[in-house]
């Protein structure tokens, strides 16, 4: 994708409300934003670069394409922005996801509806209530339904035709009084639907119709002298009353409202939402929103108001909040200063501030725990080895050869007690003939730190040599030649008894076998051994292939290596056409290779 000519693109952008989308070089949407004035907002990314933070500058550097959509109002832009963020999940936006994590209560749309819980939203299935961020209130409501109503729990398709055909039989739920047997036609659908109607009222947070429903049935039963039945209705009214008394009740004059409060720090915003219906808080949730581009609180609050109202299906005509959103939300927004609404807002703020403090303390504790564990090990290692500084960067060397063939060495690096894979290095031994661990160690240590000195890269805080006094002595001689001896601590670790050797000290140090510092040294040593063995196997395999090709007259090491580099294997050379091989090594050698492979196949 060509470089982004922002001046040319800005000329196309109008002074209208809308949504803009930025794309990177791969064509992926990396940011979605809304604006009251598209031209002014988009221009600000490219003309006010000195005012941008590091993350915004990174976003601008990746923009290769711009698209925009004009809408009628800024509120329409906010709604569209919400949808597009969910669709594209751009990496520079705070991430809004359709809430499929929390469960919903669904009253199914079928004959003799069921009341079920689900995490999948399919509006064709029925009417959904939720989501329930806290499961306890949801199960409390469901338990209350089992006490108040006789709602079926079976999955039968209770159409009139199926019931009349006698397809179903009542189950245990009928015999213990939890169901009235609609599957056998023992309960009229109209009678069942009256209970379902009350279920809808309660799930909407409106308890008054249900209370009137049971009261009328109690009076009706009492008038008919059915006192036992009247008592049952009275008990159901008591169940509703107990449920209401456990709910958080606010002033009934605050009929329907959504309460939002926001508090933030440098990295995240914390938003509390409370849904008030008929003077009762029926839903509450607090979330953490990670900042991506240093978004403002009013901007984040507007986004989260749209998100929560969408999730909870809220149509409340009043929003109570602690700051003014930066968008006209087309509902009444109140920032109360006194009275019951102020108390309600303070309750929300108390929740959001507690949530923020809890998250900050948890993050600090985790950071401290991680740091302390790492530092504890390194501090213990510093003490055990009597080092002057904390061994934050440790480099370890190991040699590998089998029966004296293909000698190689490897160096691994641990930073902060963890592998730094990008710092690992392989060495093919160049100056040593045959198996000579001491000379090989001298060569690789010399090569490694000659390069470090030339490139002025980081010097280790500790060098570990996999081996005993001999290998350690060779490594020390290499450091002396480079004038580094005594400037960088160096130790050797012998495999048999896990002894630690120091330069010019015949007596080894034995660290407690359970010590975290010894385990770290062993882990580094084992990683160096693994890395060296892997390289040795690769090289041995390659050399064996070169040796096989050298059986062909006229093919030497250089030609064999050239063939393997091009074809990636002997089998590929065998399968290649004569012309393909001749293009690499010439017709004469290609012919000799063909004769060689034909002879092998026919033998």
Image: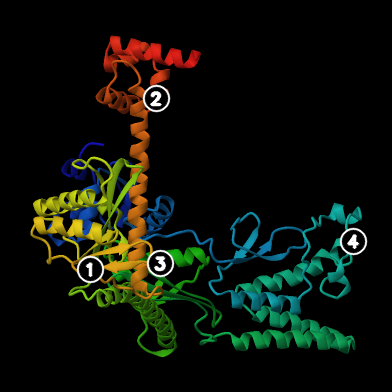
Separation of marks 2 and 1 at Cα, in angstroms: 48 Å
Image quadrant occupied by the N terminus: top left
Residue that carries the numbered disc 3 in the rendered image: 304
Q: Between disc 1 and disc 4, whose residue precedes?
A: 4
Q: Between disc 2 and disc 3, whose residue precedes?
A: 3
Separation of marks 1 and 4 at Cα, in angstroms: 86 Å
Circle nearer the viewer, 3 or 1? 1
Answer left or right for 348 relative to 492: right
Separation of marks 2 and 4 at Cα, in angstroms: 74 Å
Q: Between disc 3 and disc 4, whose residue precedes?
A: 4
Residue 42 visible (yes or no)? no
Circle nearer the viewer, 2 or 3? 2
User: How busy is the neighbourhood of tag 1: few (under 14 within 10 Å), some, or many (20 plus)?
Assistant: many
Residue that carries the numbered disc 1 in the rendered image: 502
Residue that carries the numbered disc 4 in the rendered image: 169
Separation of marks 3 and 1 at Cα, in angstroms: 62 Å
Which of the numbered marks, if any, corresponds to residue 570? Answer: 2
Which residue is located at x 14 percent, y 57 percent? 477
């Amino acid at each position: 994708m060509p470089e982004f000519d922002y001046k040319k693109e800005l000329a196309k952008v109008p002074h209208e409300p809308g949504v803009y989308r930025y794309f990177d070089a791969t064509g992926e949407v990396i940011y979605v934003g809304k604006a009251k004035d598209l031209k002014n907002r988009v221009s600000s990314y490219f003309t006010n670069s000195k005012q941008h933070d590091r993350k915004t500058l990174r976003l601008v550097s990746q923009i290769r394409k711009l698209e925009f959509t004009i809408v009628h109002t800024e509120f329409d832009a906010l709604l569209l922005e919400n949808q597009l963020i969910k669709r594209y999940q751009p990496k520079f936006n705070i991430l809004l996801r359709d809430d499929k994590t929390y469960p919903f209560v669904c009253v199914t749309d079928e004959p003799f509806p069921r009341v079920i819980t689900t995490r999948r939203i399919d509006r064709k299935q029925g009417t959904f209530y939720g989501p329930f961020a806290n499961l306890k209130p949801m199960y409390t409501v469901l338990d209350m339904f089992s006490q108040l109503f006789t709602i079926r729990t079976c999955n039968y398709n209770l159409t009139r035709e199926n019931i009349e055909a006698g397809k179903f039989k009542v189950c245990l739920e009928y015999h213990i009084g939890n169901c009235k047997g609609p599957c056998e036609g023992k309960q009229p659908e109209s009678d069942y639907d009256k209970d379902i109607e009350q279920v809808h009222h309660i799930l909407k947070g409106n308890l008054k119709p249900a209370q009137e429903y049971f009261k009328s049935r109690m009076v009706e039963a009492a008038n008919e002298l059915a006192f036992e039945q009247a008592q049952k209705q009275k008990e159901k009214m008591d169940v509703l009353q107990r449920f209401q008394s456990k709910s958080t009740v606010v002033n009934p004059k605050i009929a329907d409202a959504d309460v939002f409060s926001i508090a933030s720090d440098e990295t995240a915003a914390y938003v509390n939402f409370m849904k008030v219906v008929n003077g009762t808080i029926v839903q509450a949730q607090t979330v953490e929103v990670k900042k991506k581009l240093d978004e403002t609180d009013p901007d984040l609050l507007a986004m989260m108001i749209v998100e929560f109202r969408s999730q909870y299906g809220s149509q409340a005509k009043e929003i109570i909040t602690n700051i003014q959103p930066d968008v006209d939300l087309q509902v009444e927004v109140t920032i109360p200063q006194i009275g019951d609404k102020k108390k309600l807002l303070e309750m929300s703020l108390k929740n959001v501030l507690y949530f923020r403090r809890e998250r900050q303390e948890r993050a600090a504790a985790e950071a401290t725990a991680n740091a302390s564990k790492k530092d504890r090990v390194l501090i213990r290692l510093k003490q055990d080895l009597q080092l002057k500084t904390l061994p934050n960067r440790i480099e370890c060397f190991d040699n590998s050869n089998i029966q004296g063939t293909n000698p190689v060495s490897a160096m691994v690096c641990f930073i902060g007690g963890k592998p730094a894979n990008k710092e690992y290095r392989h060495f093919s031994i160049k100056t040593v003939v045959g198996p000579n661990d001491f000379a090989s160690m001298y060569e690789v240590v010399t090569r490694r730190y000659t390069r470090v000195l030339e490139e002025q890269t980081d010097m280790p805080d500790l060098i570990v040599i996999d081996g005993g006094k001999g290998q350690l002595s060779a490594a020390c001689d290499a450091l002396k030649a480079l004038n580094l001896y005594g400037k960088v601590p160096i130790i050797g670790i012998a495999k048999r008894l896990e002894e630690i050797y120091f330069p010019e000290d015949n007596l080894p140090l034995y660290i407690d076998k359970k010590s975290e510092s010894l385990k770290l040294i062993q882990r580094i040593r084992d990683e160096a051994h693994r890395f060296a063995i892997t390289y040795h196997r690769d090289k041995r395999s390659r050399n064996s292939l070169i040796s096989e090709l050298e059986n062909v007259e006229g093919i030497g090491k250089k030609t064999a290596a050239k063939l393997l580099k091009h074809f990636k294997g002997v089998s590929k050379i065998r399968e290649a056409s004569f012309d393909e091989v001749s293009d690499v090594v010439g017709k004469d050698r290609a012919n000799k290779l063909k004769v060689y492979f034909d002879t092998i196949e026919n033998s």
